[in-house]
Amino acid sequence: MIRTFAGMMVLVGFSAAGAWQSGNAADARDRTIVPGERVGAVTAGSTLVQLRRVYGKRNVREKKVHVGEGQYVPGLVLFPGTRAEVEFRFAEGARRISLAVITRPKSPWKTAKGIGIGTTGARIERLNGKPFQLYGFEWDYSGRLAGWNGGTLHKALIPDFKPTAKLPAREAQKVMGDARFSSADPVMRRSKIVVYRLQIGL
């Protein structure tokens, strides 16, 4: 199947099993995140061969991806060593992509609503339509989203936040550790949180 995107023609493979769906973006310049569906041209069913066809062989590499506590899992890395770098993890025991991880400062990858690295917690709260839940700072899951609290944002979008304001130590201590906090918590608001890591389920 041949589709036209922004004036260029890209040949996309299509398997009977539906691993490469014709409705997905296949433009190598696309930096759109669609939680639960795709990151650019990458979907859960994408293969190494298909992605190298879209992005070029040198831009897609197999890699053992670090998942914490000295553990690594099989995966892929797109645009390695650049600000557009994205790591993709395979589902356990399968060659199916299950998760994308974005950490590079000034990364161009964003959702249609503009959520990406550096997006403020205040803006995300507005886009969600209500306060959300996140874990405290300074531990293994520091600043990880704990839930959208029934808001409008997709559950497959999982940002990690960090504080950017320098608060007195006694005040900062109130939002640290293995506990859930509302983004509307007064100390959390004064912490001026921003996204520093973004995970996207596929």
Image: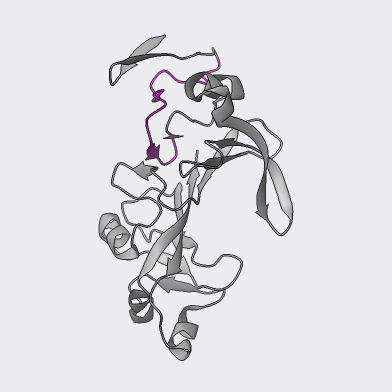
Residue 40 percent coordinates (x, y): 42, 32
Say if 193 sits above or below 96 in the image.
Answer: below
Write the residue at 45% across / 83% down.
172
- Give the number of marks: 0
User: Furthest-right residue in view?
Assistant: 70
Q: Position of residue 70 (x, y in %)?
A: 74, 56
In the picture, which quadrant includes the N terminus?
top left
Above or below, 137 against 57 in this view is: below
For residue 20, above or below residue 160: above
Position in image of residue 147 (x %, y %): 44, 60
Q: At 50% from the left edge and 62% from the top edge, which residue is drawn?
A: 144
Residue 45 as seen in the image, left or right of residue 155: right
User: Residue 117, relative to residue 134: is it above or below?
Assistant: above
Tell me how the rendering is colored. Answer: one colour
- Asked where in the image residue 164 lies, by quadrant, the reply is bottom left
Q: How far across and down, in percent of the image, does residue 79 sit?
A: 52, 36
* Of residues 193 and 98, the one drawn nearer to the viewer in this rendering: 193
Q: Residue furthest bottom?
A: 170
Q: Is residue 31 magenta?
A: yes
From which residue to which does the magenta span run?
17-38
Q: Nearer the viewer, residue 178 or 101?
A: 101
| Farthest top residue in view | 1
Q: Residue at x 38, y 76 (%)?
A: 165
The quadrant where residue 19 appears: top right
Q: Would you say residue 24 sits in the magenta stretch?
A: yes
181 vs 73, nearest the viewer: 73
Is most of the magenta stretch helix, strand or loop?
A: loop
